[in-house]
Image (cartoon, grey):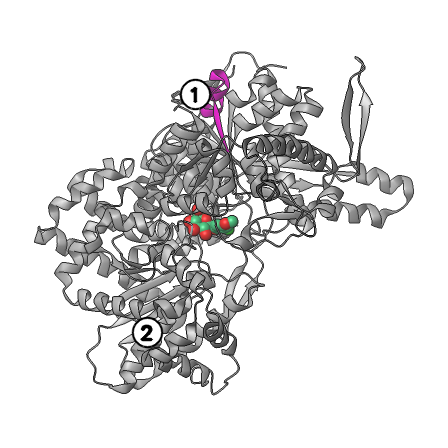
């Protein structure tokens, strides 16, 4: 069936952008989509009406992008990620459409507070932290650069938990992000796919008498795609984020009829739908749970089957899969794609093994995001076989051929073979997902220069020696649209007034700001903007926590997931050091500081949760001790997420990036702070190294051991007690914690932290303590010279050009994906039906 070549007329109420159009459209959507007369409308109704008004203005770009990509059979990037931490859509879409200001005017003219509607939106928290947020920044840049892209992932019903703090402890609350409906997504049930699980394999002879493998699964679930448009900045490109929801197949209902086991049938339905029920809330740690493997295979198979459907729709022969698609694996979470693409090409599309293998390798590329051994994914063989019997056979076959190649290249080296095998056979047997990803990909990259070097020297050393040409570095970046233009409108205005708006899509242009560092008017404006933003945050802290913080104090901020390697407790050791100085001499002249913490702990990570309790405990004592006289304040900001982050980065004077060198793969918060004019105190870890290189050493507060020194120190036998014994200030800090001073006299509460530091200190807090405190003293001194501080702040922001995700994505496009921009055609007010 096909519509005649009619023009679909697109009405002004759906696309018009005059203030009058926008007002009319908003009221129409309130009435006809929300079904509310203004008299009965809630704040959420107004938000929804506004969201639909924006969505209507996206639709033409989205449809035109789909048409253009189909007609051109464009090479497409597929970014496979178990997490996408998109943040609120409304403001970001308005920025990318270039409609933020007119829409604000229209809504305000209707007597409705636009900013309140922006704040009304919850966020889809479909990620843990850096890895998920990176995926979101990359979708923004891919669209801005007009690269045909699909983001593929999981539509979790419950995203990352909402964090409450009760009595200083983290409490987890389920995140019901879909409760009020989601105006940004469209279900596409017509593209539902079927995902097999379990069962066994058989061999059979086809009509030519050739033996083939067949998987006879025990059960299946349906994967239903939900699409969200991802806009490019002021271009016609609107790409798609396609998230899969698991649903039970209809057949369950028939089984209930036939067997009478109604409960059993409904229960099977519940089990299927569990697959996409909840995001695993672990950052950098694996759990080895079968449900997690089900999630991974589910979204990977859905996505690869979707690509095959698109190939067939465009009548592209399957041999050209790798020409049509460049598939990026965001860590090993989607690494099962190696075996699944082989299965689809060999078992379902009947390609020969060697041809399928060449296609697979040419299609896939793998990004590693961590060196932490506890994060390297492995699956017990039995668990793996029970769920994916055919994939285990395929992995054995890949491994046999691979081991043969390694045996020839590195003769008589059994230890190397054992290390590189896709199967860990050192004890209980496991499938090693990083090895699978390396073997099945044509490109492997780390996420910062140091991280990529360490990868080659440590966890992926054997793979580097085997195929060095696959390895490269792609330093992370963040999108200046969300993290500058949207989050920091005042700074955006100031910058644009001076250098124009080209920097928004070409962040290197910020360098032009350097010419103003001796312009007193500019410096004054820069500083007063920072103060105004600090006041906004101070107001919200007063409102939410009842704590008064002074905007003349240094806003010293550490926001990120809570982890021992990130060392929030090193920050605390410094805070307690300052407190001890005040207690020893209440009249001491210290630079006032406001210490802000935010971040979630994995619910099963005991030490991280205790670290949150310690921050709270220290803040309670310090904030109300009259000797302190308000000169230091400590606040733990609950439920840190993308939405709140947008208020935090612009308000910072000092960005805490204090991980043990060699542990933080990149970090991306470090970039968001710096481009908003915060100075960094940090170790030579992850992208800090490159941030310092760009900013200049004189504009960066560096402390601590290098990764190399950490390695040596550990090899020599690290003894934290020696540091404790030699440093009276450190001693006093630890003793204060151990004495129960911060815990109403309870000496046991924080003992696990004290014991851990005194006995092993795996992240070398004690080794870095003195260097950190001295560096913080330099920070305090520098802040006293406001002119100098402001100059450093401007220089930091001016030199962060390379940390735009546009730069990162351009490198991925050129070096890994080999894709070019496709300009999406424009239509005016109507589009052709054919
Ligand atoms: C994650 O957020 C990161 C690494 C992971 O390794 C897992 C998660 Cl959920 C499996 C982070 C890194 O810790 C951080 O350094 C990096 O900036 C970020 O990924 C993006 O690359």
Instruction: Please say whether residue 71 is one of the residues in the magenta stretch.
Output: yes
Residue in the foreground of this view, choosing between 735 and 180: 735
Quarter location, residue 791: bottom left
Among all residues in the image, which is located at the extreme right? 259
| Total numbered circles | 2
- Residue 740, position as x, y percentages in the image: 46, 85
User: Left of 786 or right of it: where is 226?
Assistant: right
Image position of 299 (left or right of 557): right
Q: In the image, which is nearer the foreground, mark 2 or mark 1?
A: 2
Q: Which region shows up in magenta? A: 64-78
Residue 636 in sight:
no
Q: Which residue is drawn at 76% across and 23% down?
A: 212
- The residue nearer to you, when weighing 797 against 273, is 797
Work out whether residue 443 or residue 287 is closer to the camera in this orientation and state it.
443
Position of residue 594 relative to residue 56, above or below, is below
The label number, if any, that marks residue 633 in the structure image: 2
* Residue 830, numbered label: 1
Q: Looking at the picture, how far across and down is residue 179, in whole percent? A: 57, 51
Q: In which quarter of the image is the N terminus?
A: top right
Instruction: Using a 10 Å C-alpha cutoff, classify the residue at mark 1 as few (fewer than 14 neighbours), some (14 to 19) or many (20 or more).
Output: few
Q: How far apart are marks 2 and 1 (CA)?
A: 58 Å
Residue 26 appears at what percent x and percent y?
42, 40
Taking the spot 12% from the left edge, 47% from the top edge, the residue there is: 516
The mark nearer the N terminus, 2 or 1, is 2
* Element marked by disc 1: strand
Mark 2: few/some/many CA within 10 Å (<14, 14-19, 20+):
many
- Assess whether residue 357 is covered by the magenta stretch: no
Residue 661 point in image, percent of width and height? 38, 57
Per the image, label 2 sits on a secondary structure element best described as: strand
In this picture, is 702 found above or below 33?
below
Q: Could you say which disc has been placed on residue 593 in the image?
A: none
């Amino acid at each position: 069936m096909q519509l005649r070549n009619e023009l679909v007329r697109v009405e002004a109420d759906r696309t018009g952008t005059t203030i009058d159009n926008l007002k009319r459209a908003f009221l129409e959507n309130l009435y006809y989509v929300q079904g509310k007369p203004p008299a009965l409308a809630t704040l959420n109704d107004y938000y929804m009406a506004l969201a639909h008004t924006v969505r209507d203005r996206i639709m033409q770009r989205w449809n035109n992008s789909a048409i253009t990509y189909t007609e051109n059979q464009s090479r497409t990037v597929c970014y496979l990620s178990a997490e996408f931490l998109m943040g609120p859509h409304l403001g970001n879409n308005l920025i990318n459409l270039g409609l933020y200001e007119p829409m604000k005017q229209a809504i305000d003219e209707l007597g409705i507070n636009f900013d309140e509607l922006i704040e009304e939106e919850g966020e889809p928290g479909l990620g843990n932290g850096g890895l998920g947020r990176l995926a979101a920044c990359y979708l923004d840049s891919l669209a801005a650069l007009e690269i045909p892209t699909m983001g593929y992932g999981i539509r979790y019903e419950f995203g990352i938990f909402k964090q409450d703090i009760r009595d200083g402890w983290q409490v987890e609350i389920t995140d019901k992000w879909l409760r009020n409906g989601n105006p940004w997504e469209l279900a596409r049930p017509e593209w539902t796919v079927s995902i097999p699980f379990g069962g066994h394999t058989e061999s059979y002879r086809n009509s030519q008498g050739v033996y083939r493998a067949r998987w006879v699964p025990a059960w299946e679930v349906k994967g239903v795609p939900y699409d969200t448009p991802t806009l490019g900045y002021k271009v016609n490109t609107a790409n798609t984020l396609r998230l899969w929801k698991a649903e039970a197949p209809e057949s369950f209902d028939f089984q209930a009829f036939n067997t009478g086991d109604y409960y059993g049938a409904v229960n099977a339905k519940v089990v299927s739908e569990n697959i996409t029920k909840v995001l695993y809330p672990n950052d950098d740690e694996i759990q080895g749970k079968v449900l997690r493997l089900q999630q991974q295979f589910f979204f990977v198979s859905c996505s690869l089957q979707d690509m095959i459907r698109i190939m067939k729709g465009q009548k592209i022969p399957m041999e050209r899969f790798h020409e049509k698609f460049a598939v990026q694996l965001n860590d090993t979470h989607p690494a099962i794609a190696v075996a699944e693409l082989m299965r689809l090409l060999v078992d379902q599309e009947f390609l020969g093994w060697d041809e399928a293998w060449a296609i697979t390798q040419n299609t896939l590329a793998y990004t590693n995001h961590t060196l932490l051994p506890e994060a390297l994914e492995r699956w017990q063989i039995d668990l793996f076989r029970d769920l994916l019997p055919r994939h285990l056979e395929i992995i054995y076959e890949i491994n046999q051929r691979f081991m043969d190649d390694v045996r020839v290249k590195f003769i008589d080296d059994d230890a190397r073979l054992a290390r590189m095998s896709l199967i860990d056979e050192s004890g209980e047997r496991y499938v090693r997902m990083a090895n699978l990803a390396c073997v099945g990909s044509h490109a492997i990259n780390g996420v910062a220069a140091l991280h990529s070097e360490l990868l080659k020297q440590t966890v992926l050393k054997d793979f580097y020696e085997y195929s060095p040409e696959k390895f490269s570095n792609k330093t992370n970046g963040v999108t200046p649209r969300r993290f500058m233009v949207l989050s920091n409108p005042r700074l955006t205005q100031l910058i644009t007034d001076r250098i124009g708006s080209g920097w928004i899509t070409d962040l290197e242009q910020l360098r032009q700001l350097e010419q103003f560092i001796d312009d007193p008017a500019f410096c004054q404006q820069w500083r007063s903007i920072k103060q105004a933003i600090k006041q906004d945050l101070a107001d919200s802290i007063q409102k939410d926590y009842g704590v008064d913080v002074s905007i003349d104090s240094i806003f010293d901020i550490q926001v990120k997931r809570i982890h021992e390697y990130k060392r929030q407790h090193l920050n605390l050791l410094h805070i307690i050091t300052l407190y001890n100085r005040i207690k020893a001499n209440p009249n001491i002249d210290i630079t006032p500081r406001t210490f802000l913490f935010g971040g979630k702990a994995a619910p099963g990570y005991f030490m991280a949760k205790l670290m949150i309790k310690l921050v709270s405990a220290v803040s309670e004592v310090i904030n109300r001790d009259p000797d302190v006289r308000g000169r230091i304040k400590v606040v733990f900001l609950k439920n840190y997420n993308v939405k709140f982050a947008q208020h935090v980065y612009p308000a910072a004077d000092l960005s805490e990036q204090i991980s043990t060198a060699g542990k933080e793969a990149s970090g991306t918060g470090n970039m968001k702070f710096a481009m908003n004019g915060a100075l960094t105190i940090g170790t030579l870890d992850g992208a800090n190294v490159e941030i310092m290189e760009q900013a200049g050493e004189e504009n960066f507060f560096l402390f601590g051991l290098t990764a190399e020194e950490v390695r040596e120190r550990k090899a020599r036998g690290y003894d934290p007690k020696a540091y404790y014994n030699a440093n009276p200030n450190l001693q006093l800090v630890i003793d204060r914690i151990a004495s129960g001073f911060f815990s109403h006299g309870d000496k046991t509460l924080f003992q696990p932290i004290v014991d851990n530091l005194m006995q092993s200190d795996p992240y070398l807090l004690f080794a870095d303590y003195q260097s950190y405190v001295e560096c913080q003293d330099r920070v305090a001194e520098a802040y006293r010279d406001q002119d100098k501080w402001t100059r450093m702040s401007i220089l930091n922001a001016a030199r962060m050009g390379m940390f735009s995700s546009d730069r990162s994505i351009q490198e991925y496009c050129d070096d890994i994906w080999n894709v070019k921009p496709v300009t999406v055609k424009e239509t005016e007010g109507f589009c052709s039906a054919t």
